[in-house]
Image (spheres, rainbow, N blue to C red):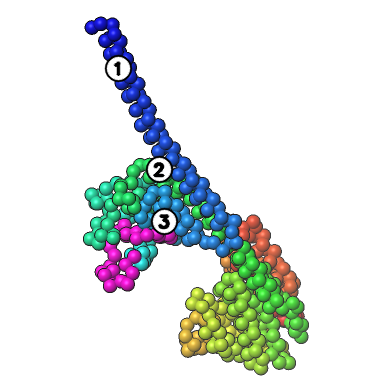
């Protein structure tokens, strides 16, 4: 081979090598451009998602969690090019509740009922089926992803036994991605998408992007829940403040003077207003009504029921010297106003100032205690049968409730309280109890009604210490002057 031929061969080889390199560079460059475009698109989606979700927090405050989740799901479907999706969040009892659904999202556990063939809107019927079923941890694909905290990619769902198979074409699941929504190692929920709109299966890149989106969304969901909790606390604080004002207005500002007797009372409201109530009512020239009650409802509802109870008691007490008859009237008039979980325990007493006879009826309330000035006589716990106002049928309430009477001697002291006194607890979860109550009263009974109330308050507060006070503590004491 001559020199020219060899040179031409070398040049040809070099040309082919260069052409091959150019082709490789062109192909690689094209792949890089495709990858760059995809990354730019993903970046745009993420930026749009962050910006769009942030608008929920800076809006007028009317947005709710479901609106936030719908936005999250919109970007999830857009990112993965999915035809349908759902977001499950942990609710009560660690159940995963479907909070957002877009598209025809087939149930991932069970089957739609046969009524789907008769449904006017099949897509709406399927969505209602999904929404009605809360998923337990470990149940099906949704529960497993939430329980383990790991994502799941099923490229060929029709071959996976964990994925339900549907005969209806619009319910068939061809490909599926599920990712946990995590915040600080806690799985808050699950984001699931099914069936790419282009018919292709989901790939690992789809899972990675959806997981990144779910992690970002979890931060938003976490702080949205904090905002919801803060709003709820502010509403509760306003509720309690209104209730406290109502309660303070209903309690007597000053107790009346009763000839020959001394009466004292106190009320220590708790952080949660429970609706304790006491009152002293003049029935006629020689009879006085003395009441102490505890409404079971909290907040404004309890304060309103206390206001109704006070009004009915005062209107029915005038001219009526039988406490049982007064309480029967109160029960008849209030019964229809009670919610199922509400009732009023009440002790109502009528004092005859001429005879010193005290007649009482107890509608499910704490039993009062009578301390005799005669040291030879022990403290007497006064009991009478009766149901709380609002419990049981009218006939049952009327039949069980009975009056009982005692005659107060000089220096005798009667003390009544709500259960917030005897059930007060300290930081060690120890209950103050009836024994401490009796000892505190006996140590100061000879000093007068006001001394009894002050001594009880001081001892209970000292016993509670730094522990929170969960219930109102109300006391009332009546002493016949020596």
Q: Position of residue 337 (x, y in %)?
A: 54, 82
**Tag 3 residue:** 87
Quarter of the image where one finds residue 26 = top left
**Tag 1 residue:** 12
Q: Which mark is residue 305?
A: none
Q: Position of residue 198 (x, y in %)?
A: 32, 50
Question: What secondary structure is marked by label 3?
Answer: strand
Q: Position of residue 324 (x, y in %)?
A: 57, 88
First reached walking from the N terminus: tag 3 or tag 1? 1
Q: Position of residue 322 (x, y in %)?
A: 61, 90
Question: What secondary structure is marked by label 1?
Answer: helix
**Tag 2 residue:** 208
First reached walking from the N terminus: tag 1 or tag 2? 1
Q: Is residue 76 magenta?
A: no
Residue at figure coordinates x 64%, y 82% from the top left: 310
Residue at figure coordinates x 57%, y 89% from the top left: 329
Residue at figure coordinates x 52%, y 61% from the top left: 64
Magenta-drawn segment: 96-123
Is residue 272 at all visible to an observer of this figure? yes
């Amino acid at each position: 081979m001559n020199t020219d031929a060899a040179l031409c061969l070398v040049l040809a080889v070099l040309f082919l090598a260069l052409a091959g390199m150019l082709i490789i560079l062109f192909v690689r460059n094209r792949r890089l451009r495709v990858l760059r475009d995809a990354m730019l698109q993903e970046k745009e989606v993420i930026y749009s998602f962050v910006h769009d979700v942030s608008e929920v927090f800076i809006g007028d405050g009317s947005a709710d969690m479901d609106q936030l989740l719908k936005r999250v799901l919109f970007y999830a479907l857009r990112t993965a090019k999915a035809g349908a999706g759902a977001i499950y969040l942990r609710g009560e009892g660690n159940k995963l509740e479907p909070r957002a659904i877009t598209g025809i999202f087939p149930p991932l556990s069970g089957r739609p009922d046969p009524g789907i063939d008769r449904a006017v809107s099949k897509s709406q019927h399927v969505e209602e089926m999904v929404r009605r079923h809360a998923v337990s941890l470990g149940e099906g694909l949704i529960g497993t992803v939430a329980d383990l905290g790991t994502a799941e990619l099923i490229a060929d769902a029709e071959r996976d036994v964990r994925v339900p198979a549907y005969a209806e074409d619009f319910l068939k699941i061809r490909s599926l991605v599920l990712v946990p929504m995590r915040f600080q190692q806690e799985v808050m929920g699950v984001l699931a998408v099914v069936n790419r709109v282009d018919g292709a299966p989901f790939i690992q890149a789809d899972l990675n992007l959806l997981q990144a989106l779910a992690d970002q969304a979890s931060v938003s969901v976490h702080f949205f829940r904090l905002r919801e909790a803060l709003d709820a606390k502010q509403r509760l604080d306003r509720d309690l403040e209104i209730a406290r004002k109502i309660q303070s207005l209903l309690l007597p500002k000053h107790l009346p003077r009763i000839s020959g007797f001394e009466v004292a009372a106190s009320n220590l409201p708790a952080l949660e207003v429970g609706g304790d109530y006491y009152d002293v009512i003049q029935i006629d020239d020689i009879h006085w009504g003395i009441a102490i009650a505890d409404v079971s409802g909290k907040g404004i509802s309890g304060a309103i029921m206390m206001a109704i109870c006070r009004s009915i008691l005062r209107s029915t007490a005038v001219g009526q010297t039988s406490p049982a008859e007064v309480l029967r009237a109160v029960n008849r008039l209030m019964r229809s106003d009670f919610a199922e979980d509400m009732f009023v325990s009440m002790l109502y007493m009528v004092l005859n100032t001429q005879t010193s006879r005290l007649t009482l009826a107890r509608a499910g309330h704490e039993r009062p205690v009578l301390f005799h000035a005669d040291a030879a006589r022990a403290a007497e716990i006064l009991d009478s049968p009766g149901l709380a106002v609002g419990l049981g049928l009218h006939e049952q309430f009327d039949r069980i409730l009975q009056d009982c009477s005692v005659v107060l001697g000089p220096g005798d002291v009667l003390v009544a309280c709500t259960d917030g006194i005897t059930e007060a607890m300290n930081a060690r979860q120890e209950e103050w109890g009836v024994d401490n109550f009796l000892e505190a009263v006996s140590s100061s009974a000879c000093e007068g009604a006001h001394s009894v109330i002050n001594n009880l308050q001081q001892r209970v507060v000292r016993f509670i210490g730094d522990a929170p006070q969960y219930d109102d503590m109300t006391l009332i004491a009546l002493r016949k002057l020596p």
